[in-house]
Amino acid sequence: MDLVSGSPFWPLRNGLIASYPGLDASVECHVAVLGAGITGALVAWELAEAGVDVVVVDKRDVATGSTCASTCLLQYEVDTPLHRLVHLVGEAHAVRAYRACYAALKKIPRLDRVLGGGHGFRRAESLQGASRAAHLPGLRRELEMRRLHGFDVEWWSRARLARESTLPYPGALVARDAAQIDAHRFTHSLLRAASARGARVYDRTRVTRRTSTRGGVTLHTDRGVKIRARRLVVATGYETAPYLAEGLSKLVSTFALVTEPRAHFSGWPGERLIWETARPYVYLRKTDDGRALIGGYDEPACDPRRRAALLERKTTALARRFRQLLPKVPCEVAYAWGGTFAETPDGLPYIGAHPSAPHTFFTLGYGGNGITFSVIAAEIIRDLICEGRSRDAELFRFDRPAMV
């Protein structure tokens, strides 16, 4: 599947950070990781750090699938608000899932330091504006539910929004804990560190077939060589159909643009991330080189030709929305792109084993919080492989109840 249209900003800005060889001879390992995006890189890092013999393989260059199209907002919130998630999966399950995301968010700066920094990481607050007055009661319920369970959130009235920004919202929920990063650079650093601990990374090598035996999995490649592994981790993001036929999610096209650099962003509420209650919503952040990024206006389609055809119109719509929110800031579009992501019924990812795939674990960080989900997935997969169990695996299992 072609996952990206247009000109994603991160690889253009960063260039070719590192290159990896194609696999030209058969290999054996304890764990094969299929996919060298942010999710596969986090899994490889956790396993290599635990002393596991890992091979990573990708059909593309490293970090050039969905990872390069990510807008890289880091939040503990999932697309389903906590007060709604409680009704879908139960209060205990919902709160544990939010707390797992919160813990993952707190782990990312530690990883950033261990890897030497330079990934554009910055802590921030997250401001979610009520797109319409009718959304205020729901946003207030979310405020109350988060406070009830110990999350640090604050209410901003229309008057405070007017004092501190040009945002036209009638109210907003501000979460203290959020951040941003450059996932493209972060992925390369994770793989470099995993390689230093013994992981073997191969790109531009397509897996054409998978076979299973009692002892493990064999991956057959387009280069005529094989990877034999005791366990397989599928971290292919939105391209899982060859490995998991069951329809678990809905694929969606999303769009983003980044502006030319500016010295000042008059009307922006500090350094906060911005997003909305509308569906589909838009979201905004600044980059570490002084640009603004706005994304959203999702479409219920993933056909690459349709996504490419929509790019110009969606770019125009995003630029128009940017000017409505920040009328004092010129929106000079530098780059624009579209990408594919997936949604689940409850907004949570699928992580773990599936009965249809022996010796295989899946890390499907679907939803608008993919990087945080990937951190969780990497820890769960590490624990399942190294210890045979994981405290949080039940939260994201494939057979979890959709309703209570």
Image: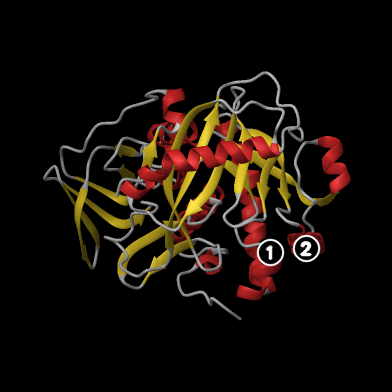
Q: CA distance from mark 2 to mark 1?
A: 10 Å
SS at mark 1 in the image: helix
Comparing 267 with 30, the one in front is 267
Q: Position of residue 380 (x, y in %)?
A: 50, 57
Q: Residue at x 78, y 60 (%)?
A: 136
Query: Residue 41, can we see it?
Result: no
In the image, what residue type sits under mark 2?
Answer: His
SS at mark 2 in the image: loop
User: Is label 2 in contact with label 1 (beta carbons under 8 Å)?
Assistant: yes
Work out which residue is located at the far top of the displayed protein and give it. Answer: 263
Above or below residue 286? Residue 51 is below
Q: Position of residue 72 (x, y in %)?
A: 55, 40
Comparing 108 with 148, the one in front is 148
Mark 2 and mark 1 lie on one chain; the one further toward the N terminus is 1
- Please state if 268 lies on the left or on the right of 163 as rendered: left
Above or below residue 108? Residue 113 is above
In the image, what residue type sits under mark 1?
Answer: Leu
User: Residue 82 — which label?
Assistant: 1
Q: Which residue is mark 2?
A: 149
- Please state if 259 lies on the left or on the right of 49 as rendered: right
Circle 2: is it few (<14), some (14-19), or many (20+) Cα within 10 Å?
Answer: few
